[in-house]
Image (cartoon, rainbow, N blue to C red):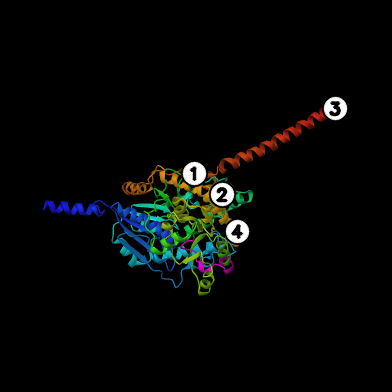
Amino acid sequence: MQSLVLLILQALCFQGIYVNGLNILVYSPAIAPSHVNFMGSLADLLADAGHRVHIFMPEMMPGIQTNGTTKAQRIIRQPSTFAESPFTKLRFFTDPFSDKDTSVFAPEQVSIMLNGYVLFCQDFITNERLLSELRSVSYDVAITEVYDYCPIGLFHMLDIRTTVLVSAVPVTDFHADVFGLPTPLAYTSNTLSAFVNAPKLTYMERIRNIFLYFVSRNVFTKALLDGENEVFRKHVDKYFPDLEQLTRAVPVLFVNTHPLIDIPRPISANVFYIGGVAMRQRKPLSEEFEKLTQSSTKGVVLFSLGSFTNTATMPAAMKKGILDAFHEFPEYTFIMKISLSDEDKALFAGYRNVHTFSWIDQINLLRHPSVVAFITHAGQNSVMESMFAGKPMICIPLFADQEYNTATVLNKGVGVYVNRKNVNEKTLGNALEKILRDTRFTKAAQRLKSKLEQYPWDPHGNFVRWIEYVAKFPEADIVLEGATIGFFKYFLLDILIPAFLILVVSIYVIGKLVHLLLRKLQKLLKTKVE
């Protein structure tokens, strides 16, 4: 009997399942495939460490089939009850190549996102069947990427002791606000704004940066907080805790970036960079892709604008310009991830060195020695994958954090930038000429790859160990005072304004006294003369 028990325990350990493993709930909304994959990779890490991981996935965007995980024990997908998701109306989904503003801070974009988050929040916190399913397990830890406050409130409803925040993009103003991180606006730009030359902003860009900082914190975030607070207090409990205060009680934040890659900014001891945590072991390419990589004379250039971008909306003139640019480099093979109509297929068939696919094995292609460059939208995962593979980039950012990510590429000297509004044969051809002919870009990319590989840290182990630590000690021990003090105190306005007024009054009084003194002296001199 004793031997049987021992064998069972050994088998459990072999499978990575431990008696004292944590029950972990990962909130991973299906809103962008790259984000789903990032959250899934974290779930797999925790499952490998012997923890029981369940993923809750509200279907906020249609058509996202991936769960991002191969090892989570349970996937709870929550279909949308709406005829059409509000997020499908976002311009960077419907027309990412538009000449109009695709920034997340464009007024119509803000309105759509605010409405969407509040509607989805109300949808699943009032779903008794879903809540019953989530309550059927006593979770020790809940992990969420922060799009809004709703998952924080949900975890409070479920009585989960420990909440952990993660971010698939670099630190945003929202994260800085929650954790009280200093944000020196002279050199710290908004992650979701359009500054490819960050941190060296022009005078007008610095003005816009200040404006976006206040819009982000005092308009968008406040409206979102008010809307979701109202949802919880209407449908759950009229005395439901303030969602902002619940969020400030979170002990740690994990960010998908790397100290060698990101633009340096102030952080605190409870903010951890885990860039590279989603990097997986290289796998062999399929026979089709392997054959293409071997058939090229000088190498392969990979083209992908990400899993979220609707390339079917790409203007015909842009497609023709891209193809004509590729045609100028016949010694290279171009592998493109793109959606094509029947008319497009006829056009593309005329370019023998261009091969199109609806899906590509991006991470393994980038690691292949025959791939020499990457034309990318500069999504954070794509940039990380390319840098870890040592491949130079041509960045065509479309929306959200992609221009900020492009800035990190330019700062490291491992790529060039092409404006999405001006992609044509000439601009893309010039960019290819630089990347393929100027060896400095490849050398810089290879050197950065070596630095990343040898950087003395372990994002995988650190992430798992910190999750296990905060499961035991859920309280937020490291709280910067900046997270709770008001606007006036944070910017020292309670000191600077009175000091300025005192200075002005002092100058005025001194001026008056000097004026009176001069008048008296003038009268005195006049009297003496007489």
Between the C-alphas of marks 4 and 2, the distance is 22 Å
Dots 3 and 2: beta carbons under 8 Å?
Answer: no
Q: Which residues are magenta?
A: 303-319
Going by the numbered disc 4, the residue's amino acid type is Thr
Question: What residue occupies the far top of the structure in this picture?
Answer: 528
Front residue of 128/174: it is 174
**Circle 3: element type:** helix
Question: Residue 76: x, y in percent?
Answer: 34, 64
Say whether residue 42 is magenta.
no
The residue under the point 57% across, 69% down is: 316
| Residue at the disc numbered 1 | 266
| Residue at the disc numbered 3 | 527
Q: Which mark is residue 453?
A: none
Question: Residue 523: x, y in percent?
Answer: 82, 30
Q: Is residue 124 visible?
A: yes
| Residue at the disc numbered 2 | 198
Label 1 environment density (alpha carbons within 10 Å; few <14, some 14–19, many ≥20): few
Label 4 environment density (alpha carbons within 10 Å; few <14, some 14–19, many ≥20): some
Going by the numbered disc 3, the residue's amino acid type is Thr
Which of discs 3 and 2 lies nearer the camera? The answer is 2
Going by the numbered disc 2, the residue's amino acid type is Ala
Dots 3 and 1: beta carbons under 8 Å?
Answer: no
Q: Which mark is residue 427?
A: 4
Between the C-alphas of marks 3 and 1, the distance is 67 Å
Which of discs 4 and 2 lies nearer the camera? The answer is 4
Label 2 environment density (alpha carbons within 10 Å; few <14, some 14–19, many ≥20): many
Side of 42 relative to 521 (left or right): left
